[in-house]
Amino acid sequence: MTQAEELNSTNPPKRRRWATLALGIGMIVIGAVVLVAVGGYYGFGLYGASKLDELNVVKDGPVSLPELPAQATETTEIHGALMPDGSFKPINTVATSPEAFFASGGVAVNPETVQAPITRVAQVVPVRTVYPEPVSKPAEASQSIHVSTEPVAELAPVEVVAPNAEALVSNYNSIYPGFQIHPKYWGDPLWAGTDPYTYGVVSRPDGFAALSTTDGLARGQGAQARTIRIPSIGVESTIKDLEVINLGDSRSYETPDNLVGRIPTTAQAGETGNAWFFGHLESPIKGEGNVFRNLPQIPGMLKNGDPVYVSIVTDDGEYLYQITETEVVHQDDLQLTETDDSTITLVACVPRLVYDHRILVTGKLVGVKRG
């Protein structure tokens, strides 16, 4: 056998060994990646499942359409800071008396009508007569140096205007308006957001006439729902009645595609009974949108005392609902329930990436805008 033939006979086994080794390492790496991905998926699912109980909230307090507050007159003082470049940066703060704020039950009061009393305190500045000590004159000192030994003039009493404690607190809060921060940030003011806090005055959409939950229309008298709006979580979407799909051995409602779907066998907006609306939390596979992606934020808003309103526009007007309860149920336990008053229920899948539970957000009728 020649040298070339011998070389060719020994190289193929070496190449095959290296190829087999590389394939084995690649499969191990791919298996590890898959294992980490699956473990992360289930870990995230377990974490999400552990947080589901936090989505069960019932609103405390009455459910009604509050009166719109009278237009408040605010007095604004301009405070600021001197910047390094010599410019003045103004900081606008509302000067409101904290005493009036709490005494009114959390309603802003015009500070012009609340005068903090000022106490004038006559204070006498301590006075003593000071005689300068004589200074020995060195021989080489100038003859023109004169050392006075006359006593210093006595200081007269002065009157100091000193505000009382209430005035000091009011002035402090006008510069550092801590009581204007939303209560949910009081425990950690350094991370406070910019959520509006209206001193207990509930902000709501204007132009609605108040209704009771028992004032709903009779079934069959309501008009077709067209649009749903939830300003608190940034939702504005078209509404479509979901059709029934025949699956052969069973039937099911179609899934909403980039909109909110209404179960057509349930009540219309404004009618007596429960109107059911479904939307996707997210749809990464089918790409059917995520119209209800922020729906799980509503339980936290209810806990913090923030009112959440849902308006549904129909062919004959707009109906306003106030959210009163959120609940999480397993997908196998979901049932379309009825009510004796006018309510709505919004539904989305939770938790993320698992979607085996449903969050039910329930609201009661509180207002209507005709036309």
Image (tube, rainbow, N blue to C red):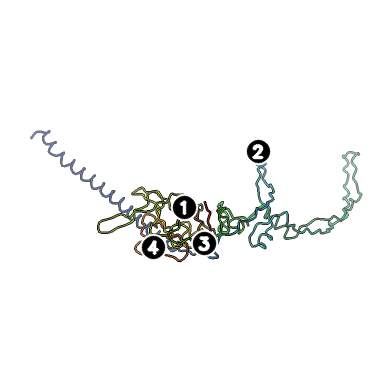
Q: CA distance from mark 1 to mark 2?
A: 57 Å
Q: Depth-wise, is mark 3 or mark 1 nearer the camera?
A: 1
Query: Disc 2 designates what residue?
Result: 85
Which element is circle 3 on? helix
Pointer 3 residue: 303
> Which label number is shown at residue 314?
1
SS under mark 2: loop
Mark 4 is on which residue type? Leu
Nearest to the observer: residue 251 or residue 371: 371
- Residue 303 position (above or below residue 371): below
Q: Where does the image place residue 298, in percent across and percent down from the top left? A: 48, 57
Mark 3–mark 4 Cα distance, whole angstroms, equals 26 Å
Q: Picture coordinates of residue 338 (x, y %)? A: 42, 64
Q: Residue at x 25, y 59 (%)?
A: 249
Which residue was labeled with disc 4? Answer: 336
> Which numbered disc, 3 or 4, marks the residue that appears first in the sequence?
3
Q: Amino acid at mark 2?
A: Asp
Q: Earlier in the sequence, mark 2 or mark 4?
A: 2
The quarter of the picture where the N terminus appears is top left
- Cα gap from disc 2 to disc 3, whole angstroms: 45 Å
At which x and y percent is residue 369?
Answer: 53, 54
